[in-house]
Image (cartoon, coloured by chain):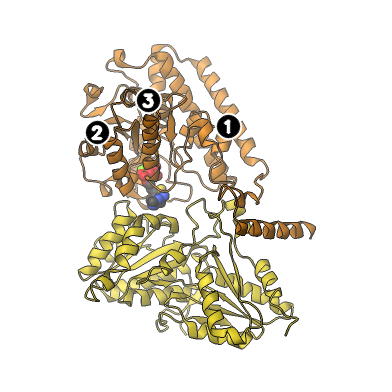
C-alpha cells in the first residue's frame, strides 16, 4: 500500500483533484471555494490548478447553487457543490427535496442528476449556532438521494470518488471534527462500493453501530471496554443510503447485542431506522433490546454545553452495561 | 428624500478630510458629537472583543472595524420602542442600542445563542443564517401596522446577503405591504472572500430598490452625518406610513471576516490601505475639532468612557460559566415533553455522578 499521511480535508481535496483531472465535466462551485479554497481549505488550489471555469465562487445563495447544479447536471456536467456548513444548506432544501431527489423518477429515468452536494457536517468543534447540525435524517428520509458519511480520510477520499462517479445525486456529509485529523491514506486503493458498511473492529460480546463523527467515539469506547474485559465490535455504516442490511445484521447476529451511536437527536432519526432494521432482521438472535446513544432532542447546544449533548464514551459504555448481561 | 444631497449618486455630507460642503444640511452639532462618542465606544468594543478572541475568551468575533458609522447611525435614528434586527457583525450596534455588551457577547463566548432579552431591548437575536432575519423584520413591522403602532424596524444585512432569496422576498413583502422597515445594507465589499462583483452586476445594490418599487439611497457608509440624515428620513417615511426604504451604505470591512479568516488569500494590503483614510471616526473628529466642539478634554472624557466599557467587558466575559446544562431542555417547548424530561434526568444523574468522582 502506498500510503501518504494527510488530513481528511486533504484527502477530499485529493479526490476532487483526481476527479477533475480525469473528467472535464466535473466542476466545483459554492461559497468561498475559489481563491480562499473553502473555509475548511477543502478546495484549496483547485481554482489555481483547473481554472476559474472548473472551480468558482457563486453569488451567496444556497438555493441558487443547488438549483444551478441541477441544470448543469441536466446538460452534461458533473457538479460537485459545497454548502458552507450543515445548517446553511437549508435554504437549498426545496431544490434538494423537490428536484435533486425526484428528477429521475419524475422523468422515468430519462433525466438523471450525477451531482454531489458536499456538506461540512455535525459538531464537536465548538462552533456557534447553525454550524454543527446533524442533518442526515432530512436527506436519508428523502427517496432519491444517496447519503454518504465517511469516518476516515481514506473513506472520505474513496467515497467521494465513488460519489462523483455515481449516476445518482449524492449528499456527501463530511464530519468537520475530523477535517484536520491526520491519517495514512492510500489514494491508489480501489474506490469503495457505495452501499457497503465496514467492520472497523471485530468483537464477540456486542456490536457498536456508528457512522461519521461517532465512529471514533465507538472505537474509543470499544478500546476502553476491552480494558474492562468486554469485547465490543464496531461497524461503520458509511453509506446511510443505500443501507447495508447484510453486513450490519450479520455482525449483530454474531454478538446478539447492539448499540447505535449517533450525534443527531434520536427522535425519528437514522439511529431509529437502524434499530428498527436490526430488530426486524436479528430478533431471534438478540439477547437484549437494541439501544441508541444519540444527541438529545434539542437544538444543537452552544459551544460550552456541547459536551453534554454529544454521545461520549461514558454514555456508550453505560448503555452497553444495560444490555442484560446477567440473563445470558 | 434627501437624494438631492447626493454627489455622483452617493449621499455624502462630510468628506474624508472632515470637510462639510454644506454645513446647513448637517444634523445638529451636539448630535454629531454624541455620535462621535458612540463611535469611539464602538471601535473600542471591536478592539476589546478582538483581544478577547486572541486570549481565547471568545470563540470568534466578526468585527465591524471601519463600519462604526453604520453601527451607530442605525441605532441613533431609532426610538426606544422601535426594533433593530442585527447580524453577527453588528455587536457594536446592539451595544449602542443599550444592550450590555457582555450580554451581547454571550453568543460569541459560547454560553448561549442569545445573551440578551430581545423583547426588553427591542433587538432581535443576532442572525447568522444570512438574510433570514429580514423577513422577520418585515413581520414585526407589519404586525405593528395591524396593531396600530407606529413602530419602525431597522433591518441590517451585508452585501453578500443581498444575493439570498430571503433578501428579495423581504424587500418585496415590505414594499407590497408598505411595511415600516428600513433595510440598511452595509456594503463592506466582501462576503468572507467573495468580492462584491461576484454578488451583483447591478449599478449598485441600492439600484435594486427600483425593482421592488421602493425608494433607495446609496450613502457614504463612513460618513456618520450622511447616514444619520438618510436613515432619519427613511425612518420618518416608515413611521408616517409611506413604507420601506432600501439604504446601501458604501463602506469597507477593514478587518478579516473573523479571526479564523486569512484575507491575504483574496485581497491585497494596498486595497485595505486605500480605505483607511476614509475612516469614519477620523473624518468626524476633524470636523468636530474644526467646529470647536471637540477638544482634548472631551476626547479624554470619551476615552475614559471607552476604557470603562472595555474593563466591564473584560471582566464580564472572563467571569465563570454560569449556564446550567439543564437549560438545554428548558426552552425547547413551552412545556418540556416527556422525552425531554427523561433526557434531562439522565444528564442530571450523569452530572451528579461526575461530581461525586
Ligand atoms: C445562509 C447562510 N449561508 C452561508 C453562511 C456562511 N457565511 C457567514 S458570513 C458569510 C458572508 C456574509 O457576507 P455579507 O452578507 O457581505 O456580510 P459581512 O460578513 O460582510 O458583514 C457567509 C457566507 C451563512 N451564515 N448563512
Ligand atoms: Mg460584506
The picture places residue A317, in percent across and down from the top left corner, at 68, 71
Circles 2 and 1: CB atoms closer than 8 Å: no
The answer for which chain carries disc 3 is: B
The residue at 32%/19% (across/down) is B19
Q: Is residue B298 above or below residue A93?
A: above
Q: Which quadrant holds residue B174?
A: top left
The residue at 51%/78% (across/down) is A277
Q: Are marks 1 and 3 on the same chain?
A: yes
Q: Which chain is yellow?
A: A
The picture places residue B127, in percent across and down from the top left corner, at 44, 44
Secondary structure found at label 3? helix
Secondary structure found at label 1? helix
The circle on residue B214 is: 2
Q: Earlier in the sequence, mark 1 or mark 3?
A: 3
Residue assigned mark 3: B224
Secondary structure found at label 2? loop
Q: Is residue A282 above or below residue B348?
A: below
The residue at 43%/57% (across/down) is A85
Residue assigned mark 1: B310
The answer to whether any part of residue A5 appears in the image is: no
Q: Are marks 2 and 1 on the same chain?
A: yes
Quadrant into which the N terminus of chain B falls: top left
Calculate the distance from the C-alpha at mark 3 to the C-alpha at mark 2.
Answer: 23 Å
Which one is nearer the viewer's eye here, A10 or B144? B144
| Mark 1 Cβ and ligand 1 under 8 Å apart | no
Q: Which chain is orange?
A: B
Q: Which quadrant holds residue A293?
A: bottom right
Pointer 2: residues within 10 angstroms few (<14), some, or many (20+)? many
Amino acid at each position: 500500500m502506498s500510503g501518504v499521511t494527510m488530513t481528511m480535508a486533504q484527502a477530499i481535496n485529493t479526490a476532487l483533484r483526481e476527479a477533475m483531472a480525469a473528467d472535464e465535466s466535473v466542476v466545483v462551485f459554492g461559497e468561498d471555494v475559489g481563491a480562499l479554497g473553502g473555509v475548511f481549505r477543502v478546495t484549496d488550489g483547485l481554482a489555481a490548478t483547473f481554472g476559474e471555469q472548473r472551480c468558482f465562487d457563486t453569488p451567496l445563495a444556497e438555493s441558487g447553487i443547488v438549483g444551478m447544479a441541477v441544470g448543469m447536471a441536466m446538460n452534461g456536467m458533473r457538479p460537485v457543490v459545497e454548502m458552507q456548513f450543515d445548517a446553511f444548506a437549508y435554504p437549498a432544501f426545496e431544490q434538494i427535496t423537490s428536484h435533486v431527489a425526484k428528477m429521475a423518477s419524475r422523468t422515468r429515468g430519462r433525466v438523471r442528476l450525477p451531482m454531489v452536494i458536499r456538506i461540512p457536517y455535525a459538531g464537536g468543534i465548538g462552533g456557534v449556532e447553525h454550524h454543527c447540525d446533524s442533518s442526515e435524517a432530512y436527506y436519508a428520509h428523502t427517496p432519491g438521494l444517496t447519503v454518504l458519511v465517511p469516518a476516515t480520510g481514506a473513506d472520505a477520499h474513496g467515497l467521494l470518488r465513488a460519489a462523483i462517479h455515481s449516476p445518482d445525486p449524492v449528499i456527501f456529509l463530511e464530519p468537520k471534527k475530523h477535517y484536520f485529523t491526520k491519517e495514512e491514506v492510500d489514494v491508489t486503493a480501489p474506490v469503495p462500493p457505495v452501499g457497503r458498511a465496514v467492520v472497523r473492529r471485530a468483537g464477540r460480546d456486542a456490536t457498536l453501530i456508528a457512522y461519521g463523527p461517532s465512529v471514533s467515539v465507538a472505537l474509543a469506547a470499544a478500546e476502553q471496554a476491552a480494558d474492562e474485559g468486554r469485547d465490543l465490535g464496531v461497524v461503520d455504516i458509511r453509506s446511510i443510503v443505500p443501507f447495508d442490511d447484510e453486513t450490519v445484521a450479520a455482525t449483530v447476529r454474531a454478538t446478539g447485542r447492539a448499540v447505535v451511536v449517533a450525534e443527531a437527536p434520536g427522535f425519528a432519526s437514522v439511529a431509529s431506522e437502524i434499530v428498527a432494521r436490526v430488530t426486524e432482521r436479528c430478533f431471534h438472535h438478540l439477547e437484549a433490546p437494541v439501544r441508541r446513544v444519540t444527541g438529545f432532542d434539542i437544538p444543537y447546544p452552544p459551544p460550552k454545553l456541547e459536551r453534554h449533548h454529544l454521545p461520549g464514551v461514558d454514555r456508550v459504555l453505560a448503555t452497553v452495561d444495560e444490555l442484560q448481561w446477567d440473563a445470558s | 428624500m434627501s437624494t438631492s444631497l447626493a454627489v455622483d449618486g452617493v449621499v455624502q455630507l462630510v468628506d474624508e478630510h472632515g470637510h462639510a460642503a454644506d454645513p446647513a444640511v448637517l444634523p445638529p452639532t451636539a448630535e454629531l458629537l454624541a455620535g462621535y462618542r458612540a463611535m469611539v465606544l464602538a471601535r473600542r468594543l471591536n478592539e476589546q472583543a478582538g483581544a478577547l478572541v486572541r486570549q481565547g475568551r471568545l470563540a470568534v468575533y466578526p468585527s465591524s472595524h471601519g463600519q462604526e458609522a453604520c453601527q451607530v447611525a442605525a441605532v441613533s435614528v431609532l426610538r426606544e420602542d422601535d426594533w433593530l434586527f442585527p447580524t453577527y457583525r453588528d455587536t457594536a450596534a446592539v451595544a449602542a442600542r443599550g444592550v450590555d455588551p457582555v450580554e451581547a457577547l454571550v453568543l460569541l463566548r459560547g454560553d448561549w445563542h442569545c445573551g440578551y432579552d430581545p423583547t426588553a431591548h427591542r433587538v432581535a437575536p443576532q442572525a447568522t443564517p444570512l438574510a433570514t432575519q429580514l423577513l422577520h423584520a418585515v413581520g414585526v413591522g407589519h404586525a405593528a401596522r395591524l396593531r396600530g403602532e407606529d413602530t419602525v424596524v431597522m433591518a441590517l444585512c451585508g452585501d453578500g446577503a443581498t444575493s439570498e432569496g430571503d433578501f428579495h422576498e423581504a424587500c418585496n413583502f415590505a414594499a407590497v405591504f408598505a411595511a415600516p422597515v428600513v433595510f440598511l445594507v452595509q456594503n463592506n465589499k466582501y462576503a468572507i472572500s467573495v468580492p462584491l462583483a461576484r454578488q451583483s452586476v447591478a449599478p449598485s445594490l441600492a439600484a435594486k430598490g427600483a425593482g421592488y418599487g421602493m425608494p433607495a439611497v446609496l450613502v457614504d457608509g463612513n460618513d456618520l452625518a450622511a447616514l444619520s440624515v438618510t436613515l432619519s428620513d427613511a425612518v420618518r417615511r416608515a413611521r408616517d406610513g409611506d413604507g420601506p426604504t432600501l439604504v446601501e451604505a458604501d463602506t469597507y470591512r477593514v478587518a478579516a471576516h473573523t479571526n479564523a479568516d486569512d484575507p491575504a488569500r483574496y485581497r491585497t494590503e494596498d486595497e485595505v490601505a486605500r480605505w483607511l483614510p476614509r475612516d469614519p471616526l477620523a473624518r468626524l473628529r476633524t470636523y468636530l475639532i474644526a467646529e470647536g466642539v471637540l477638544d482634548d478634554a472631551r476626547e479624554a472624557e470619551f476615552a475614559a468612557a471607552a476604557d470603562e466599557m472595555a474593563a466591564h467587558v473584560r471582566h464580564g466575559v472572563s467571569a465563570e460559566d454560569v449556564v446550567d446544562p439543564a437549560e438545554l431542555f428548558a426552552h425547547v417547548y413551552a412545556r418540556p415533553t416527556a422525552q425531554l424530561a427523561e433526557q434531562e434526568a439522565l444528564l442530571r444523574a450523569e452530572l451528579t455522578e461526575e461530581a461525586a468522582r
